[in-house]
Amino acid sequence: MDALILVAEGAVAFLLGAGLVYFVTRQGANSMTRQARDEARIMVEEAENRARKVELDANQTLLARREELEAEIKERRNELSRAERRLEQREETLERRAENLERSEQSVRDRTVNLEKTEAEIDQIRAEARSELERVASLTLEEAREQLLQNLDGELREESNRRVRAMESSARNEADVRARKILATVMQRITSEVTAETTVTVVPIPSDELKGRIIGREGRNIRAFESATGCDLIIDDTPEVVTVSGFDPVRREIARTALARLIQDGRIQPTRIEDAVDKARAEVDKLIEQAGQQALVDAEVTNLHPEIVRTLGRLRYRYSYGQNQLRHCIETSWLAAALAHEIGANVEIARLGGLLHDLGKAVDREMEGTHARLGADIARRFGVPREVVHCVEAHHEEVPPETVEALVVICADAMSGSRPGARRESAEEYIKRLEALEAIANSFDGVDQSFAVQAGREVRIIVKPERVDDLGASRLARDVSKKIEETMQYPGEIKVTVVRETRASAVAH
């Protein structure tokens, strides 16, 4: 019973609790619903307010944009109106110009017609005047034109010759003054001997008894000597003299040195000859090296290949017309450097070009070709600058000189070779050169006599005055000098002077 009561009380309590929970839950749900509904209403109202504000702003923006577009359209319409007015004005202007052009063309056509009529009248008058002139002068138009052209040609030729002669005289005077000043300045700076040493080909011996020892039994000594040196020994009746003959100056010097050593030693036999020649060759090679080095010092040149130095030193034993070629190269280097300094050319190129210009003469007896080209090939092979190689190659104008320095080397070479005492010339060659100069002058028409004077430095020509006039004398001087340049080789320059003399005499009774 008690259990039932407890169960009943528990059931009642459960029901009461469930009812209380349901009531509380329902009240809370109703309250939340009302709150959510109020919040939703507020949000809707805010959204509507925002929508109305956005719509208002959009309307205001559209209104402002519309006003701007309307203003822009209005401005463009105004511009179009102004453009239309300008086009109308231009059309009116073009129409007026077209009318003016039409009137001008009509005026030009009228003037053209008048000019054609006038030209026709002038042609008629000219033809009548020409006919009248031909009748009066007894000459046709072609004959008169030919006569006039001949007179004009003679006058123009005479005037051109006078002007050419005046220009040549002025240029010659100015060039002479400048050239003399430069050359005098340069030559004053060069001091060298007036006479050059000559080639030594004769070896003196103490007595003629040595000639037999030099020849040896059955000539074996002389054959061994000639085989070892490449030179010939000439032993004749000349007392106490033995002559060494050979084309190569270095070999000739080796032979001379070896023979002098053998004569001094007194023991002359094939084995001693070979030993003496070897020692002489070593001595000469050393002298060649020293001569090349000394030439560089004298010419103030550095940094040359040793082979070029040795080749240059070989020129110590080479002579041309009695002038030592090594001294000639050093002197040419001095002169070229001084000339280059005076005229503003490259001094170092001119100095080195002058020193090496005859380098090929050291090998021209062993190789084919001119010494200018051989020297240029050697210089080019051992790294000499291209400008210097051109100076070497062009110093005899086998190659046309293209630089100022090349011309300077040509002038310096001529100065060194043509100064007084530099070279000796045989009497026969001297006479032949004078005769050749006179023959060239006599080959021209109108020449009466010619004379080579001042040791061949000047040619004076006397012409026949009835066959050569004053202008012809000027032309003759130029033609003779040009032919001398083309046909002869000579150092320095040759002056050509033409003399024309007319004498008139009368006797009063």
Image: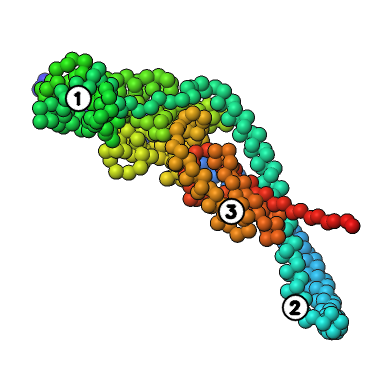
Decide: marks 3, 2 in contact (CB < 8 A)? no
Relative horizontal placement of residue 494, taking residue 472 as reference (left or right): left
Quarter containing the C terminus: bottom right
Mark 2, secondary structure of its residue:
helix
The residue pinned by badge 3 equals 479
Relative horizontal placement of residue 368, taking residue 152 as reference (left or right): left
Q: Within 10 angstroms of label 2, few (less than 14), some, or many (20 or more) residues? A: few
Q: Pick the residue in front: 122 or 257.
A: 257
- Three-letter amino acid code at disc 2? Glu
Relative horizontal placement of residue 506, taking residue 460 as reference (left or right): right
- Three-letter amino acid code at disc 1? Lys
Quarter containing the N terminus: top left
Q: Real-space Cα distance between discs 3 and 2? A: 35 Å
Q: Real-space Cα distance between discs 2 and 1? A: 92 Å
Q: Mark 1 or mark 3, which has the lower sequence index?
A: 1
Q: How is the image coloured?
A: rainbow
Q: Pick the residue in front: 481 or 194.
A: 194
- Three-letter amino acid code at disc 3? Asp
Relative horizontal placement of residue 248, taking residue 195 as reference (left or right): left
The residue pinned by badge 1 equals 211
The residue pinned by badge 2 equals 143
Relative to 26, is 78 above or below? below
Asked whether residue 205 is in view, the answer is yes
Quadrant assignment, res 272: top left
* Residue found 17% across the figure and 16% down from its top: 266
Quadrant assignment, res 84: bottom right
